[in-house]
Amino acid sequence: MQKISCKYCDTSLRIRKFTPGFEYSCPQCDGVVYRSGASNPVVVTLSLSTLILFFWMTTSTLLTVTVLDSKSYSVIDTIVILSEHDFPLSTAILLITVIIIPVLMILLINFIIFSKKLGFSKKITEKAISFYDGIKEWNMTEVYLVGVLISMIKLDELTQLSTNVGLWINFIYIIMFYITVTFFNPHDIANTIDIKQKDDNSLFKSCLYLGLAMIFIIPSNVLPIMPSFKFGVEYPNTIWGGIVELWHAKDYFVAFVIFFTSICIPLFKIVTVIIMILMAKYGVLKNLRKTMTIFYRFTDGWGKYSMLDVFVVVIIAAFIQYDQLVRVEAGTAIMPFTLVVFFTMMASKSFDVRLIWEKK
């Protein structure tokens, strides 16, 4: 019999034996308490297949854009073009979240599985697991692919656009990657339970990150995020201006997606964390604990999709570079908007949800 506590409400459960592939839920808050992974041979096969697809995905061309001439671009080409046109922040975001973190995750999966056979101590394995859990939240491969799909709509209006085999390889890679990550539970290997220790400074950290996020909200929405230049004339576009333009162009679905991910999710996250801080600090709205916990899980899980607008801008800016004829740039709003997303994610992840369930 093994005792395990819910990481959301601290409810204790006793489980006789974990069943592979089975998900254990908390009876009080409905949160997932533990999800057993697949067998090691299955995970290793999936991860190595995903790694092969990764190298194929990064070098295969996604799209071909034709304005004066035809140019085909892969993920690597996009990063190179951004660095050549002096977009350091955009280059770093794409490189870290789409290239470095996914590769590290795949390598760490295999290291954790084979660490004991390779002679590494349990302490090193546990550190590797902790690092894997930490970077997993910042993988944004699927957000990038959604950004590519939305960018295609805009690019099709500006250029002659055609898809290449790399786009379908990206789809297969992302499916394989998420099957691998879903099937792998590192805590099965080390026989540990992923329960975060209570942080006495949780409320302070969440308030600090929320304050920093609010500082950058105004500049991120006022400054241009995707200025375009046609025949030497600049057309600045803010986040809201881009949404309005898409709506007027009858791209209703894209306008809604950008509005939801760029404006609604950050605001939902800020409001959710503020309410939960008040609940933890002053004991208000205790009857809404379960509802707020469910809403917290939703906003925390979808928080990274706020980066969608950044990826759309980055992709279009990389593809449309024809000097004085027509070009698109990553605007000055990219940095404050990225910081808003980062700080709201940190505010959410720093908050210990168990605080609202404590009896006072």
Image (cartoon, helix red, strand yellow):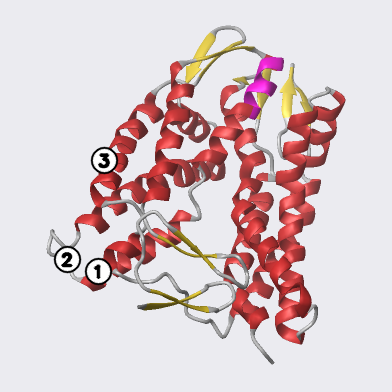
Q: Position of residue 105 (x, y in %)?
A: 36, 50
Q: Nearer the viewer, residue 15 or 201?
A: 15
**Magenta stretch: residue 308 in it?**
no
Three-letter amino acid code of the residue under disc 3 = Thr
Q: Position of residue 197 (x, y in %)?
A: 47, 80
Q: Quadrant of residue 334?
A: top right
Residue where numbered disc 3 is placed: 45
Identity of the residue drawn at 63% across and 34% down:
312
What residue is rendered at 52% in x and 72% in y? 7
> In the image, is 227 to the left or to the right of 35?
right
Mark 3 vs mark 1: in front: 3
Q: Are marks 2 and 1 in contact (CB under 8 Å)?
A: yes
The span from disc 3 to disc 2 (Cα, nearest Å) is 22 Å
Please rate how many residues cluster around mark 3, counting C-alpha atoms within 10 Å: few if below 14, some from 14 to 19, many from 20: few
Q: Nearer the viewer, residue 61 or 130?
A: 130
What is the residue that sits farthest to the front in this orientation?
16
Which segment is the magenta one? 150-157
The quarter of the rendered structure image containing the C terminus is bottom right
**Label 3 or label 1, whichever comes before in sequence order:** 3
- Please name the amino acid that badge 2 sits on: Phe
* Residue that numbered label 2 is attached to: 120
Q: Secondary structure at mark 1?
A: helix
